Image (cartoon, rainbow, N blue to C red):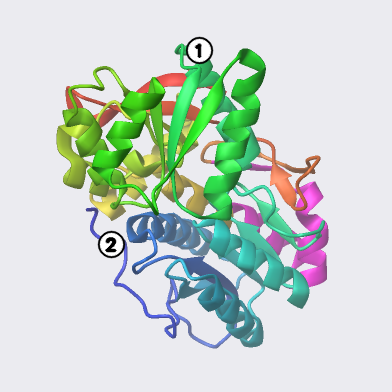
Amino acid sequence: MQPPSSPPVSASESTPASPRTDGSSVRIGALVPLTRPGWAEAGRHLLAGLELAVREVNGTGGITGRPLELVVRDTAADPRKAAAAVDELAGLGVAALAGEYHSVVARAVAMRADALGVPFLCSSAVLDTLTEQSTPWVARLAPAQSHGWRIYADFLLGAGHRRVAVATEPSVYWASGAGILRNRLAPHGGSVVELDMRALTPAAVCDELAGHGVTALLLLVGHPEPAVSIVEAVRRDERLPGMMIGAPAGQPEFTEWVTRSGPDGTGVPFLRYLPERLSSLGARIESALREGLGGAPSFVAFEGYDTVTVLADVLRSEGTDGDRIAAAWPGVDVEGSRGRIRFSRVPGIGVWQWAWAPVQVVERDGADLDQFRVLHSG
């Protein structure tokens, strides 16, 4: 597992990315999962990107002479805890909210931010319905699930997979993903078999796979468990030679996957939101993130960096008034670490959306676990 980019924080701590002096900082509330059951490694990468961008902003004069400060709250993948943090941060007078990795948690943050009238720039969550209705207060950098998972379905079709199984747990996120896959595969004669992991052991999953004649199994489950145990069982089942295992949600992106699954975890295609080749800016950010994290940064770290880059640009032009920040989303035009960022209204999505961040389907290379092979781009 990667070393943390900063000491862990509790839900009650304020963690400035630069020292405060006279109380004149411009404050951004940063929401990240730093403890279990949250995906803590993803949270640390997200925070590393946020903090790097804050340091760079402050190194170039801050926000019209005022230092930018992160006030960090650990969501621990708990929607209620996250919503309470939004209330607290709003009470502290933050100019905007940023971050969050887990889609269900980000939805709770977005709904509360909309109710309170606090601008929220979502870094990483992909669930299409971040809010129940259209809102001017929320914008998002990550591509919507309906966009990225359709690209993943196109990859499956291109690789010859028509009959696909999904090992799934109860969640609006997993259910949405399964529906996207089904709708994309069906017109091409494809089908999706759902395996309910509330009722099945990894060994029973193998029995179901052998009986249904599927060629691919997708892990729509939590990590490390039951995902790692399922992979191990399938890889060792002699009835399932050549069974493709996929993880569109991105579990293999992080080093914890390699640590726990080893060679079994290679060749598992997942979605990653990076361009095939980084720009000069992206390469510089990659190097700085690598130094801070002590290893290769995930796409989530880049999302964190781009989040603060966008917010700093808006804060410089509009100040800290929430109404003006929200009104500025459609005018954003910023060079981020992964491309030019502009927001628009996308049909079926109620928040301002970057359409789209680059999308890749990649897998870890069996010959070198630290390397990735790009299988498909969209």
Q: Against 42, is 16 above or below?
A: below
Q: Which residues are magenta?
A: 309-336
Q: Quadrant of residue 150?
A: top right
The majority secondary structure of the magenta stretch comes to helix
Instruction: Identify the secondary structure beneath mark 1.
Output: helix
- In front here: 34 or 71? 34
Q: Note whether residue 201 is visible.
A: yes
Q: Name the residue beneath numbered marker 2.
A: 4
Give the distance between the C-alpha atoms of the residues marked 2 and 1, in whole angstroms.
Answer: 38 Å
Name the residue located 61 percent from the left edge and 38 percent from the top edge.
179
Name the residue located 58 percent from the left edge and 53 percent from the top edge.
172
Q: Note whether residue 369 is visible.
A: no
Q: Position of residue 295 (x, y in %)?
A: 24, 46
Q: Is residue 319 magenta?
A: yes
- The numbered mark at residue 316 is none
> Circle 1: is it few (<14), some (14-19), or many (20+) Cα within 10 Å?
few
Q: Position of residue 160 (x, y in %)?
A: 46, 11
Please state which of the two labelled residues, at mark 2 or mark 1, is closer to the viewer: 1
- In front here: 325 or 280? 325
Q: Position of residue 103 (x, y in %)?
A: 55, 55
Q: Name the residue beneath numbered marker 1.
A: 158
Sequence-first disc among 2 and 1: 2
Q: Position of residue 161 (x, y in %)?
A: 46, 16
